[in-house]
Image (cartoon, rainbow, N blue to C red):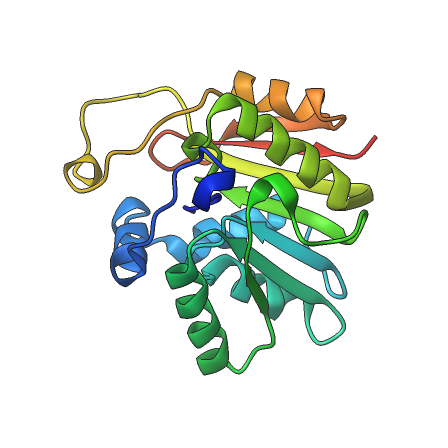
Amino acid sequence: MHAETRGTTTTGRVLHSAGVYDWLAWLLLGGRERPFRQRVLELGHVRTGNAILDVGCGTGTLAILAKERVGPSGAAHGIDASPEMIAKARRKAKRAGLEVSFEEAVVEAMPFPAEKFDAVLSTLMLHHLPRSVREQCAREMRRVVRPGGRVVVVDFGARTGGKSILERFHRYGRIEPAEIQRVLTDAGLRVDESGPMGLHDLQFVVARVP
């Protein structure tokens, strides 16, 4: 969900509160975190044997679920700019008995070769980035996804109601689906579908390599 960039090389926002991260996710998703993340995997057409990347992986829940789905013949990776998030993600994967690669990295320069992944996922992350870094991130996602592969972005869209209980604890930003589509298209991806996630004002955009 959070934390994409860090240090002096970026202007993106980084969240380091790994201790409360999972609680905030539970609160935001109303206890429906697993179905939500399974929906993200479905949008990415994640299947057995795939190689998956979670960008801004937080404490690793989505990447761990991806590894369960891709199985021993597949691979799941997660990157986040927060060392605290990465440390907790590694602990969670170890407890689950799953081999998931978590690495501290920035979205402007992902530490992977071109065309490595079948699907690249980003949930509630892009709004933390200023416009120029969003564009860099989109170009990097395009670079590391294979021909025919998918990029799935989920983020907060237009406000549909009053201030939620979550906003009493966490002040998050918003990014319109049209802006996500523009960024992905400008990076050389083709937008296939978009719409509401059916939870709060969360919106998804799915794009692929033409």
Residue 44 appears in the rendering: no
Left/right placement of residue 37 relative to residue 164 reads right
- Residue in the foreground of this view, choosing between 35 and 6: 6
Rendered image quadrant of residue 178: top right
Rendered image quadrant of residue 134: top right
- Across and down, in percent, residue 103 comes to 56, 62
Residue 120 appears in the rendering: yes
* Residue at (40, 60) in percent of width and height: 85
> 124 above or below 176?
below
- Across and down, in percent, residue 32 comes to 36, 53
* Residue at (55, 53) in percent of width and height: 105
Left/right placement of residue 158 relative to residue 169 reads right
- Across and down, in percent, residue 73 comes to 76, 73
- Across and down, in percent, residue 153 comes to 56, 36
* Residue at (57, 52) in percent of width and height: 54
Left/right placement of residue 27 relative to residue 193 reads left
Left/right placement of residue 144 relative to residue 182 reads right
Q: Which residue lies furthest to the front in this view?
A: 8
* Residue at (72, 59) in percent of width and height: 51
- Residue in the foreground of this view, choosing between 186 and 36: 186
- Residue in the foreground of this view, choosing between 29 and 85: 85
Q: How many marks?
A: 0
Q: Quarter holding the C terminus?
A: top right
